[in-house]
Amino acid sequence: MCGIAGILNYDDALVAPPDILERMLESLVHRGPDEDGRLIDGELAMGMRRLSIIDLADGQQPIFDESGRYGVVFNGEIYNYRELRGGLLRRGHQFRSRSDTEVIVHLYEELGPACVHELRGMFALAVWDRRERELFIARDRLGIKPLYYAECDGALIFGSEIKAILQHPAVSPNLDHRALSAYLSLKYVPAPSTMFAGIHSLLPGHHLHVRGGRLQIRRYWDISFKEPEAAGNEADATEELLRLLRESVSLRLRSDVPFGAFLSGGVDSSLIVALMAETQSEPVKTFSVGFGGGDEPDELPYAQEVASRFGCDHHTLQVTAQDFLDHAETVLWHLDQPIADQATVATHMVSKLARQHVKMVLTGEGGDELFAGYARYEGEQLSRWSRYIPALVGKWIRSGARNLPGMRRGKIAINALTIKDEATRLANWFPMFSDDAKRALLDASQTTMPASAASVFAEHLGRCDATTPLNRMLYTDSKMWLADYLLLRGDKLTMANSLEARVPLLDHKLVEFAAGLPTQMKLRGRTRKYLLKRAARTLLPKAIIDRKKQGFPIPIDKWLRNEARDMVHDLLSSNNLKRRGLFDPKYVERLIRDHESGYFDYATEIWGLVSIEMWLQKFIDTSPRTASSLVAEVGHN
């Protein structure tokens, strides 16, 4: 687990600047505090910061093939490296280490770009061909590991985090207004865009190739959600799911350092812990988070029940409103761009707790997106009736629903199900601001900012082979919500604490199996994650499986009315909003006033606007600074 960065001048007569690479690597020190490495070769300068997990003594990067022609820097883990290594040895390759990184360079020597099809894991990697002067960059299938790039002044600049790219003097931090529009709709920025104009995210399942100053990007993997012709045998499917789960967890326990698991008490993380406990002679170290000051009970009792059942070495913490205020800016800096997610501070703090005990954790991300765990999947099943609602009637219904108190989830469903167009409807199923609300929010001067994020969904839907509403929604969620929201949050905030996070439910073989299941094995009536829960019944208590999905019950609505009130009024002051010229000050003022009255819950919207203003102040308003000053300012809170 590492952070990588590099510069490639398209003119091979120009030497890549090692001093800039040093600053880029310095900005990634939290991702790899153990050691660093560089490959400097004329027009190319690339390197890495290492968090050593496998082959602690000899896994230093860059690693070269036998001839020294190919060199690789790599962020991630290749879980089937032992099997790959055995095959490579039989074919005559010579190894100098027992690290997973070295199998990549030998596979590239044999297969070139096709080597990615052999890799089972999470990765962002760069391979330099010294003889042909070619650079190859690839990102894993699901987007577990991030990779960003920019083209400036005749050079390709890339890195595991945007802050590394910003260290290059040719890169100016400017707001991408179309990305901001997508963020306002979705709570995150969908790849390949970022909130920074000119800086892009390499899409999951894609690789990038540069030769002779020409950059090409190609997709090498996709998920098929094509429905099977036969219904399938439920017992056989359950047995195969359990086999794949055990195999995936077992592969992800290959480690030379202490490890544990995040445990929420939900089905996904509890199932991971149960499977870990099957193979471990020592108690599994588990880590959970709760929240102080809320009326709603948190999930700590459920996590404790699971931990007790499997004899775990269990650790917990409570996140308070003061924690929220103290860590918000640090979290934003590590994220690089805002995510309107109240759970970011909790993720950061539980990662900090875990790092005191272990160096790697397994997490439960992916179960909801593979097996239909969200309420919106039930709702989308009703979308077939949307076609019968006249557009004007739908508009009237949405307008009336906005003025109803409470009912946040109900209003979201009403809003989405009165929209005929599939892409527009999917963009409005879990919005921060609906299309109608965003039109009211945006300042009158923002005439070029699109009101809808539908075009992003339409692009993904155009490649989707599914025909049912459920599978089409699962496909877009796997491409956007999962990669650009959940996985980005998980990677950035665990790595902020030099902690590696592995996601067993997103093994690509398990993903392909789940995608190919009949829809009734994912969502049966009102039972979500049907097959996963059936498999879990052999391992988990009934109370854990059948309880209502809760998520993070963060009392942010109350915090924004009380402890965080001054922060909200400061960042979203009328003067600030007028100076930005992005949002209508009167609309924002009314939003805050209605929320503080307690009559409406606009916590998500207000926190989203607070986050963008904090980001603008941190990344856009300030002059470019060195990585070390940024780390000193916010990196160690």
Image (cartoon, helix red, strand yellow):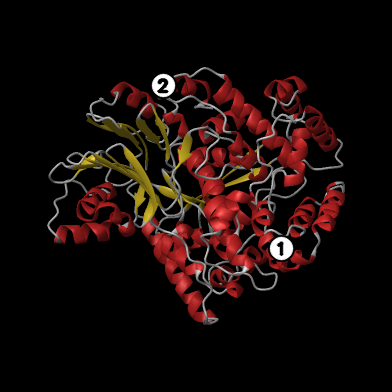
From the top left corner, tell me how far across and down residue 532 is, in percent: 55, 68
Q: Percent from the top left, x then y, of residue 394? A: 81, 56
Q: Nearer the viewer, residue 283 or 88?
A: 88
Work out whether 152 lies above or below 555: above
Please state which amino acid type lies under the numbered disc 1. Gly
- Frontmost of labels 2 and 1 is 2
Is 371 in front, or is 583?
A: 583
Relative horizontal placement of residue 601, taking residue 10 as reference (left or right):
right
Q: Which mark is residue 169?
A: 2
Badge 1 is on which residue? 379
Q: Earlier in the sequence, mark 2 or mark 1?
A: 2
Q: Residues within 10 Å of mark 2 (few under 14, many from 20)?
A: few
Secondary element at tag 2 = loop
Q: Is residue 163 visible?
A: yes
Query: Up-down: is 463 above or below 577?
Result: below
The one of 558 and 61 positioned closer to us in this rendering: 61
